[in-house]
Amino acid sequence: MKLILAIGDVEMSVKEMLNVLELKERKSFISLYLDSAINEGYVNMLYPDSPRHPHQKYLLTIKGLAVYNEFKEMGK
């Protein structure tokens, strides 16, 4: 949930997500959070055919945006 809220309606790099979430360990972040969010259909890569693209960013899928928007509505 924190990852979905961190990305929101923008595109973010792994470094940007680590900063927003105040995490330091890139490798464990990717394996524990980012890969899970991608596999569950909440997050997509901007360049899915090139996972190591130098300008790779991540964004929410329609499913991820639905969760994000629902949470925002609850907070109002």
Image: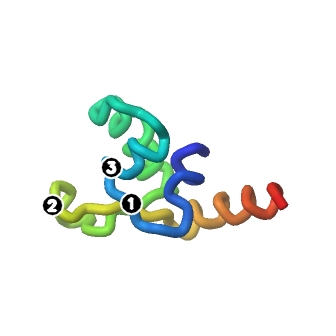
Q: Which residue is mark 2?
A: 54
Q: Which mark is residue 29?
A: none
Mark 1 vs mark 3, CA separation in Å:
7 Å
Q: Quadrant of the N terminus?
A: top right
Q: Which residue is mark 1?
A: 12
Q: Which residue is mark 3?
A: 14
Amino acid at the residue labelled 2 = Pro
On screen, residue 16 above or below 12? above
Pointer 2 with pointer 1, Cβ within 8 A:
no
Q: N-terminal of the two: label 2 or label 3?
A: 3
Q: Residues within 10 Å of mark 1 (few under 14, many from 20)?
A: many
Residue at 32 percent across and 62 percent down: it is 57
Q: Position of residue 41 (x, y in %)?
A: 49, 56
Residue at 25 percent across and 68 percent down: it is 47
On screen, residue 63 above or below 28? below
Q: Quadrant of the C terminus?
A: bottom right
Which one is nearer the viewer's eye here, 18 or 29?
18
